[in-house]
Amino acid sequence: MKTILITGAGGGISRAIIPLLYKRGYRLLLTTKSSINSLTSFLSEESIDAEVFAADLCDQKQVDVLFDWVNDLGGADVLINNAGVAHAAPAWKLTVEQMHDLFETNFYTAVRCTQKVLTHMREQNFGRIICVSSVVAHKPSFGTSGYAASKSALEGYVRGVAIDTASKGVTANTIAYGYMKAGMLNDVPQPMLDEILTTIPSGQFGAAAQIASYVELLINSPYTTGQTLHVNGGQWMP
């Protein structure tokens, strides 16, 4: 049984994929910063047996404690870097401080967790790093320059990790999904949602649960590394 560590596990996308991954036989270790009570309630309602740990991944000391806990439980075979925040501001209003905060959550949390988990993965000659990116990294919309930059940096980092770890049975990939019916999309005003729909050839928002299938694909694909999988209804075509 492979063990999956999911960061940002209190968010809507995570809650969509957690039940499916659990049903497919994976052992789940979940971490969230501020949604610990609601996440625990969700797991109880769904009859999911998973370990939960509260941590602020922007704090290196808390990351160290988190991975002491992970290693005490036998370590993680798969790391899903899902922690992230959205921010909308036109470039002339985006401050350096706001950009710094975006990178702290969307980029550096993934760097901290990846660095910590790689020791175990390299020792066992197996590991899967899966980072969550966004279609916005490839097709920004108005006011998303900061968010797009943080996710673009993440994708570049993952490609470098893939090269560094390929000889040790570790793969590193990114799933860049578009507008899914979960999580951050719930905070978008309806007029903006209507406008976004006009840019999606399939004419609909995605079902977040399908991300679980892409996670499982990457877990079972030892020859796929350094790639970005695009799941966006045709909104962006590389």
Image (spheres, grey):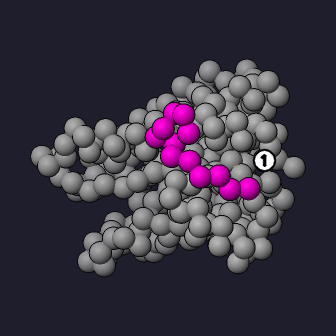
Give the residue at mark 1.
3
Q: Say left or right for 29 vs 187.
A: right
Residue visible at 67% across and 24% down? 165
**Can residue 153 be seen in the rendering of this structure?**
yes
Number of marks present in the image shown: 1
Q: Say which of 33 and 233 sits in front.
A: 33
Residue 216 is covered by the magenta coloring: no
Residue visible at 73% across and 20% down? 167
Q: Position of residue 59 (x, y in %)?
A: 48, 38
Determine the residue located farthest toward the right in the rendered image: 1
Q: Is residue 110 above or below residue 87?
A: above
Q: Is residue 107 above or below residue 199?
A: above
Q: Position of residue 82 (x, y in %)?
A: 55, 50
Q: Which element type, helix, strand or loop, lies under badge 1?
A: strand
Task: Give the class, few, some or many, for how many residues have Cα within 10 Å of label 1's Cα (few <14, many ≥20).
Answer: some
Q: Is residue 179 above or below residue 53?
A: below
Res 72 quadrant in image: top right
Q: Is residue 123 above or below residue 237?
A: above
Residue visible at 79% across and 64% down? 49
Amino acid type, label 1:
Thr
Q: Please state the extent of the stretch shown in magenta in the rendering.
A: 51-62
Q: Position of residue 17 (x, y in %)?
A: 65, 63
Q: Say left or right for 145 vs 169.
A: left
**Can residue 225 be seen in the rendering of this structure?**
no
Q: Say left or right for 62 vs 219.
A: left
